[in-house]
Image: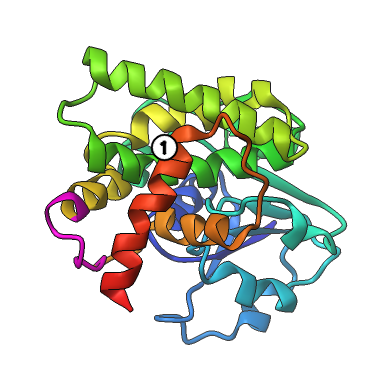
């Protein structure tokens, strides 16, 4: 069975490696390096896995067949609107660094469909489960935003009282955000929520690291993709409802005005 993976970066190839080891026929598409056309990669595919950066994903979606099951592994979508035309889509998310997955480190992710569990489960990769696709998508975007704030504001590392207090406050905000936008607040309790938040709000997270950089230099621009910046821009644009309880998110939105002015 052929599976098309859109995005030949670290996470896409980590997922592809699992599937290849299980005997699936894997074909990658990456606009930066792939000579093969998108139509060729998609031809005869029984599943499509979206694993490109969130800033690039909307440009690809119009060209994808709407009747082939789509597995969304891209983090950064704040709602399910982008997938309204797809007959069958599902979400894979959670606290998994690509390097750890490639190294066979035990990892728990979240799936919204049993087919994801069947395709990807190994002795080191397992899943918790929910049908709340909107909530899983929101968690994947919000945790990157909060990771920037963690890098910007926290003076201590993982496991300290200050760090744990930050995570607790943010988890409460995320529950309020999901509820205010039609998703299930308890999705935050899954690996895609609390698990990914804990992983991302500390080093070696790229979002956390960039928050640290911005603290010392507000004019710094990211040299690599920082997904939290893309999601933050969408939030500031008004893509989701922000409840009064989201104090830290509002704080970050205000702080980020300094960065925006420096970059303009």
The location of residue 147, given as percent across then percent down, is: 35, 40
Q: Secondary structure at mark 1?
A: loop
Q: Nearer the viewer, residue 6 or 178?
A: 178
Q: What colouring style does the render use? A: rainbow
Rendered position, 263 above or below 181: below
Q: Residue at x 41, y 58 (%)?
A: 229
Q: Is residue 125 visible?
A: no
- Of residue 8 and residue 112, the one placed in the foreground of this image is 112
Residue holding disc 1: 96
Position of 204 relative to 236 (above/below): above
Q: Is residue 19 visible?
A: yes
Q: Is residue 169 above or below residue 12?
A: above
Magenta stretch holds residue 90: no
Q: In which quadrant of the rendered view does residue 104 lie?
A: top left
Tell me what residue is drawn at x 43 percent, y 46 percent: 145
Residue shown at 47% from the left, 43% from the top: 250
In the rendered image, residue 215 lying in the magenta stretch gets the answer yes
Question: Residues in magenta?
Answer: 214-222
Determine whether 109 is above or below 19 in the image: above
> Where residue 55 sits in the image (x, y, percent)?
51, 68
Spot the residue most to the top: 161
Measuring from the top left, give residue 262's x and y in whole percent.
26, 71
In the image, residue 219 lies at what x, y percent? 20, 67
Q: Residues within 10 Å of mark 1 (few under 14, many from 20)?
A: many
In what quadrant of the picture does the C terminus appear?
bottom left
């Amino acid at each position: 069975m052929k599976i098309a993976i859109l995005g030949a970066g670290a996470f896409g190839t980590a997922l592809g490696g699992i599937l290849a080891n299980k005997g699936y026929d894997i074909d990658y598409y990456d606009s930066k390096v792939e000579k093969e056309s998108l139509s060729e990669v998609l031809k005869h595919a029984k599943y499509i896995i979206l694993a490109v950066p969130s800033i690039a994903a909307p440009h690809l979606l119009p060209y994808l067949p709407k009747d082939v099951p789509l597995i969304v592994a891209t983090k950064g979508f704040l709602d399910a609107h982008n997938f309204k035309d797809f007959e069958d889509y599902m979400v894979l998310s959670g606290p998994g660094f690509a390097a750890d997955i490639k190294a066979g480190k035990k990892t728990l992710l979240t799936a919204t469909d049993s087919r994801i569990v069947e395709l990807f489960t190994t002795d080191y990769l397992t899943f918790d489960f929910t049908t709340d696709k909107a909530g899983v998508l929101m968690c994947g975007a919000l945790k990157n935003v909060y990771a920037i704030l963690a890098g910007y504001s926290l003076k201590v590392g993982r496991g300290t009282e200050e760090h744990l207090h930050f995570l607790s406050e943010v988890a409460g905000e995320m529950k309020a955000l999901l509820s205010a936008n039609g998703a299930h607040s308890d999705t935050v309790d899954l690996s895609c929520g609390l698990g990914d938040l804990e992983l991302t709000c500390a080093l070696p997270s790229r979002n956390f690291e960039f928050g640290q950089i911005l603290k010392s230099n507000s004019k710094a621009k990211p040299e690599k993709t920082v997904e939290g910046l893309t999601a933050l821009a969408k939030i500031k644009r008004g893509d989701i409802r922000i409840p009064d309880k989201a104090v830290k998110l509002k704080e970050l939105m205000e702080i980020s005005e300094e960065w925006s002015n420096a970059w303009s």
